[in-house]
Image (spheres, rainbow, N blue to C red):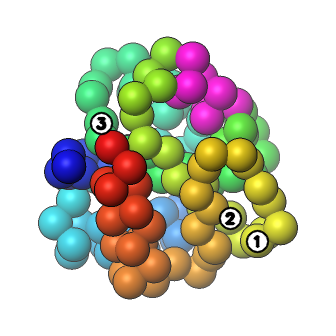
Amino acid sequence: MKVIKKILLVEDNSELRSLQVEILEASGFEVTEAFWAKSAISILKEKEFDLVLSDYQMPKDGNGTELYEWVQLYRPQLKFIFLSSMPEIKEEGVQLLSKPLTKKKLEEAIERERLFI
């Protein structure tokens, strides 16, 4: 099993992003932040990560689905989890983590991804 250490967090809401970073860093993860899908793609072109945690719905500069499609095309080995306040969202082959997030929910979702590496 691979250790998941480096996470790219993509969240357009600055308050939620700050809270999520705090939870992830308290759990021992190295977190890089991106505000939008396009900025996340730019970061992914430059750095290596073990996991992307991405908001599903972002109002500008691309959405989570576009980011996921890019990852599948260019970095298919990279693990990906969607974050959403809309639990009815379904994307085949991708975990969806409902907001609001808790430390326990995040850690459990990351552990499930780690087991499938």
Q: Secondary structure at mark 2?
A: strand
SS category of the residue bearing label 1: loop
For the residue carrying disc 2, how many other residues have a C-alpha within 10 Å: few (<14), some (14-19), or many (20+)? many
Q: Amino acid at mark 3?
A: Phe
Mark 1, other Cα within 10 Å: few <14 / some 14–19 / many ≥20 = few
91 horizontally vs 8: left or right: right
Q: Are marks 2 and 3 in contact (CB under 8 Å)?
A: no
Q: Which residues are magenta?
A: 66-73
Quadrant assignment for the C terminus:
top left
**Which one is nearer the viewer's eye here, 23 or 1?**
1
| Residue at point 70%, 31% (across, down) | 66
Separation of residues labelled 1 and 2 (CA atoms): 7 Å
Residue identified by numbered label 2: 84
- The numbered mark, 2 or 3, whose residue comes first in the sequence reads 3
108 to 46, vertically: above or below = below
Residue type, mark 2 in image: Ser
Give the farthest residue toward the right.
88
Residue appearing at x 44%, y 67% in the figure = 109
Where residue 111 sits: x, y (%)? 33, 65
Evaluate if marks 1 and 2 touch, with contact meaning CB atoms under 8 Å apart: yes
Q: Residue at x 49, y 45 (%)?
A: 80
The residue type indicated by label 1 comes to: Pro
Magenta region includes residue 117: no
Q: Disc 3 to disc 1, how far (Cα)?
A: 26 Å
Query: Which secondary structure type mostly characterizes the magenta part of the structure?
Result: helix
